[in-house]
Image (cartoon, grey):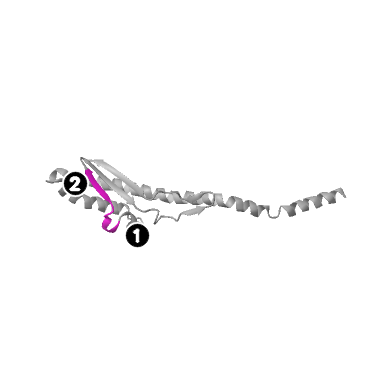
Amino acid sequence: MGKHLIMRAMQGSRERQRGAAAIEFALIFIPMFALFYALVSYGLIMALMQGMTLAAEEGARAAIAVDRSAFASTDEYMNTVRPRVRDQVGLSLAWLPDSLKTHVLGDGNENVGVQLSGDVLQVQVRYANYADAPLIPTLVLPGIGPVPRVGTELLAQASINL
């Protein structure tokens, strides 16, 4: 008889636990999904930023191949260097999908900034209005907020002393 009572008590315990797994899953799913989504989305953004930085560096290196002393004025030099730098940045970012190229490079790579200040040439690659056209959609999760949290624009730059 004691054995029967123990079995009955265990069976009642199982019946009370029947929905516990579903409740535990529901409580754990949101933070785990947020963590997974954050890892993937920040990873993609970091890969894009790394690519943009590498492209800016390659563009700055392309400027070295043009002899600045061969030009009578800074304007003539910049008119020769600017397209060369922009072309190199475009080649370095050729792996981007066309929709991203439009945001980052613009038509004919005109969004790539090339400026000369004294002897320092600066190349800027900018993903303007990132918040309006994100690489991966931003999710707003309850209790957590937006994932990923990224500024309004992404900027990569490189400088070289000529």
Q: Tag 2: Cα neighbours inside 10 Å, few (<14), some, or many (≥20)?
A: some
Residue 92 horizontal/vertical position (percent): 31, 52
**Left or right of residue 108: residue 100:** right
The front one of 95 and 111 is 111
Q: Is residue 29 magenta?
A: no
Which secondary structure, mark 1? Answer: helix
Please, what is the three-letter code of the amino acid marked with disc 1? Asp
Please, what is the three-letter code of the amino acid marked with disc 2? Val
* Callout 2–callout 1 Cβ contact below 8 Å: no
Magenta residues (range) = 106-116
The mark that comes first in sequence, 2 or 1, is 2
The front one of 60 and 13 is 13
Q: Is residue 109 visible?
A: yes
**Left or right of residue 93: residue 44:** right
**Left or right of residue 148: residue 80:** left
Residue 142 horizontal/vertical position (percent): 54, 52
Residue 127 horizontal/vertical position (percent): 35, 52
Give the label on residue 98, or none. 1
Q: Residue at x 74, y 54 (%)?
A: 15
Provide the residue designation for mark 2: 66
Q: Residue at x 19, y 46 (%)?
A: 66
Which secondary structure, mark 2? Answer: loop
Disc 2 or disc 1, which is closer to the eye?
1
Q: Residue at x 61, y 53 (%)?
A: 26
Please, is residue 44 above or below residue 99 in the view? above
Give the label on residue 35, or none. none
Residue 44 horizontal/vertical position (percent): 42, 51
Q: Which image quadrant: the C terminus? A: top left
